[in-house]
Amino acid sequence: MLSRSIPCLWITFCLHLCCFVDGGDAQNAKEVILLDSKAQQTELEWISYPPNGWEEISGLDENYTPIRTYQVCQVMEPNQNNWLRTNWIEKGDAQRIFVELKFTLRDCNSLPGVVGTCKETFNLYYQETDSEVGRSLRENQYVKIDTIAADESFTQGDLGERKMKLNTELRIIGPLSRRGFYLAFQDVGACIALVSVKVYYKKCWSIIENLATFPDTVTGSEFSSLVEVEGMCVSDAEEEADNSPKMHCSAEGEWLVPIGKCICRAGFHQKGDASCGRGFYKSSSQDLQCSRCPAHSFNDREGSWRCDCEDGYYRALSDPPSVACTRPPSAPQNLVYNINQTTVSLEWSPPADTGGRNDVTYRVICRRCSWEPEECVPCGPNVGFSPAQSGLVDTYVTIVDLLAHANYTFEVEAVNGVSDLSRTQRLFAAVSIATGQAAPSQVSEVIKEKVQQRSVQLSWQEPQQPNGVITEYEIKYYEKDQSQKDRIYSTVRSKSTSATVNNLKPSTAYVFQIRAFTEAGYGTYGPRVEITTKEENTDITLSSWLMLSLVQFFTCLIKLVSFSHFHHLKSCLHHKADQEGDEELYFQCTKTYIDPETYEDPNRAVHQFAKELDASCIKIERVIGAGEFGEVCSGRLKLPGKRDVSVAIKTLKVGYTEKQRRDFLCEASIMGQFDHPNVVHLEGVVTRGKPVMIVIEYMENGSLDAFLRKHDGQFTVIQLVGMLRGIAAGMRYLSDMGYVHRDLAARNILVNSNLVCKVSDFGLSRVIDDDPEAVYTTTGGKIPVRWTAPEAIQYRKFTSASDVWSYGIVMWEVMSYGERPYWDMSNQDVIKAIEEGYRLPAPMDCPPGLHQLMLDCWQKDRAERPKFDQIVGILDKMIRNPNTLKTPVGTCTRPISPLLDQSTPDFTAFRSVGEWLEAIKMERYRDNFTAAGYSSLESVARMSIEDVMRLGITLVGHQKKIMSSIQTTRAQMLHLHGTGVQV
Ligand code: AMP
């Protein structure tokens, strides 16, 4: 029989002579050590129970420094239960405690005759107390921290190499509430030498930043929490108004996000003390020297921090004291115009004097004047300016939608950063213009009067601006389901504001559009109106069907003959629209988004954009979430003649008000206008039954933020970039349509089973009532502050560029697997930090190119941010060249277990058997694996189904899951290493 003293002696021997494969442990400046067994050279005198279990032994470390260690090696006898307890450790201010263990462990395979008794793990416990509790040891008072397995065990052969395989394991405990604690080690029959035990917590050490001192601060209790710390101004400094200094201590003991600052009190300078003489100034305590007053400024006092502007010269709010004072520009020159019916183009040359600034832009003032006597009024909101009415950088503008036969004056003014400060007279160039004849404006208010099997009766309102006498309306229609290539347009004309369109097919969806005709020509078509004709009467006989067809045929023939003009012939059965250039417009203009709120009757908006579904086609299966207006369910939709599909069904709760119904259906009116693979697709609505429902394509993986948090660290960078690319493509489509989302965030992106991400949540994009992140800001209105661009928070400037800012935040959320942007900082601090130039740092493992793109999205000047089109291009390039997505060497990386097949992940990426079992959700069998001695992933990779059954895993489903993961891994190992493990 093997003597129990042999392995023990062997360990002692090794401790004396071996060279540890260890990086050394230079103490981290952020750590506060509570216990370091290596630092103690006298006896540790921990409690060992039973007394013949753990033994305290002296040794030498790799530097030949004497150390104290504990060893145990009861491998021959079964049912071992040897406890070792440290002395009491007072925790001080700490809330999260780090325990670093260094140990060696002997491989059971290398010991003969120990099968069944030798183990390769031990257990780590702790007990919290307010004071020392004496030397008795009660097992049931200890809380288990973890089972510790060795990454590397050593064998007898290693002895020859004199190379000790030292394992280092780190565990975190907390939050702790008592004054101190004990650590305990339970051995159940392994051969272990505990070489060092280090216990510490992390602190941000006191620093001085922005003239404020920040005291030593203990990190928070959670990994993601930041501790906010107020700074104290250094002597002779004071807090800047409304900008008190703050910093945030991270869980890693690093100071993050400085906000606010102190400034030197009046009369004090940060460095050097000479005050500035007349004609000189020093604007900041950071400056070391006084400077001469810049051009067009002066001062006649000593010790000034800035110079005053001469009369007629000004400084813009954003101008630093170091720049010259400036004045408004002179008027633009050479203003010329061009008029085409009711469209006017203006062009001019820059002013002779820019006022000394390079931020000159132009604004146009439009007035409509009566002929006699001449009185002018502002043009109002119906007139359009392209590219804009003010802030024009280029020297031209086009003004559209003017009234026909009207008199207008246009004033073009050059402005710069100080124009609004000047009280001198405005200087501008002006022209007076009379418009010509114009075509009528759009027909938009179309009403379905009567829908039959083969006919539809429509009525509509005269356009708002007829611009003459309307002599005729043209109704164009086509079958909705025909592809664009095969589409046949038909037209019907009417002298009045109603018409009946006959000869339609039953049960068929048609699209109708109407335009008006005056002497000046045709107006543009109004919005598309979709109407489905009634179902065919089933008792219609074959002969009556034949009769109908014959009647239809002859009707069309008669019409063809009666249309004498070729132009009309073409419009009866044509592939082209019949007005010159119309086809170009019809097929090539991008579709634009129509705000449902512009409809007087919101019901009409819903039916214009969303299909009314029959409630009997919908089967509700289960509740999957809660929306603002009622439950969100999953279910099936089976439309006649189509296969059934999975859908999400949003319901409107009973007892709703009319406003709630309108707001609820508003989402459908918006979503129904979109058709893009990265925007959630609306199937239709049920408004004619109860409950009122919105039916949407089903997105199996729910919202992106929760999905990423659930799968933390499980995707490759390429997969994450693929998701981001999808979101960017969806946003490109929406911005091309002129739709501004205003609430783009990972929680508003849905993910389907193929990991395709789609933009959603169009509900109340104006008010965002349903977003728990939205809070009231000082400018009024609710805003999800962390996701919103500064200009949108400050003055509600929501544009596609502010959506780009939010997209940058979504990128950060995705790359950090659903971390909360700006962690637990308050909204007020986020606003301040952004204003002061702080931007979120790169998440762990985030390739620098992606972080740079985020920073570009967070440019303060919105014109500098990339457009969605460019973002898609950049991400495409990265996906094509994956080398650009590599994280540079030396950065911290997290293990990735590619989520190719979630049900059976391979475990080449896991560090321990426990971690692997957790990933495949089989952690309940952790003790079975440990007890049977499967402590390394290599040993698990060799297991057969019989081995798995021998562990006591009886459920067939679980056996299959474990085996499937093992087999995937073997294949992966063989692929990775050529030879891989022996199987
Ligand atoms: P919402 O009212 O749009 O915020 O939806 C509430 C919750 O229902 C979301 O957070 C999702 O988890 C779920 N949900 C909404 N729409 C869908 C969908 N199309 N597919 C799957 N789940 C959805």
Image (cartoon, helix red, strand yellow):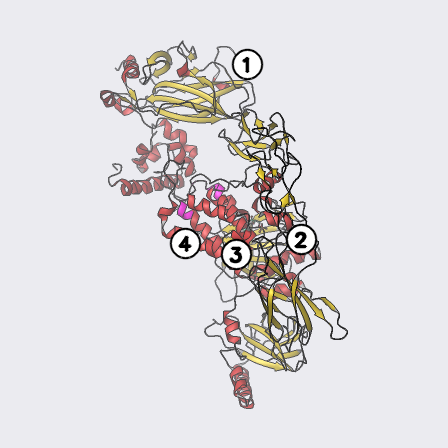
Q: CA distance from mark 3 to mark 2?
A: 45 Å
**For residue 21, what is the image quadrant?**
top left
Q: Which residues are magenta?
A: 708-719
Q: Nearer the viewer, mark 2 or mark 1?
A: 2
The answer to which of 56 and 735 lies nearer the viewer is 735
Say whether disc 2 or disc 1 marks the residue closer to the N-terminus.
1
Q: Which mark is residue 131?
A: 1
Q: Amino acid at mark 2?
A: Asp
Q: Which mark is residue 680?
A: 3
Mark 2 / mark 4, whichever is N-terminal: 2
Give the spatial CA distance, label 4 vs label 1: 61 Å
Label located before the other in sequence (3 or 1): 1
Residue 480 image offset from top left, x and y in percent? 53, 71
Residue furthest to the top? 42
Question: For residue 734: magenta?
Answer: no
Q: Is mark 3 within 8 Å of ligand 1?
A: yes
| Disc 4 and disc 3 in contact, CB within 8 angstroms | no
Q: CA distance from mark 2 to mark 4?
A: 44 Å
Spatial separation of the CA atoms under disc 2 and disc 1: 70 Å
SS at mark 2? helix
Q: Which residue is mark 4?
A: 876
Which amino acid does the dot numbered 4 rest on?
Answer: Asp
- Mark identifier at residue 879: none
Q: Quadrant of the N terminus?
A: top left
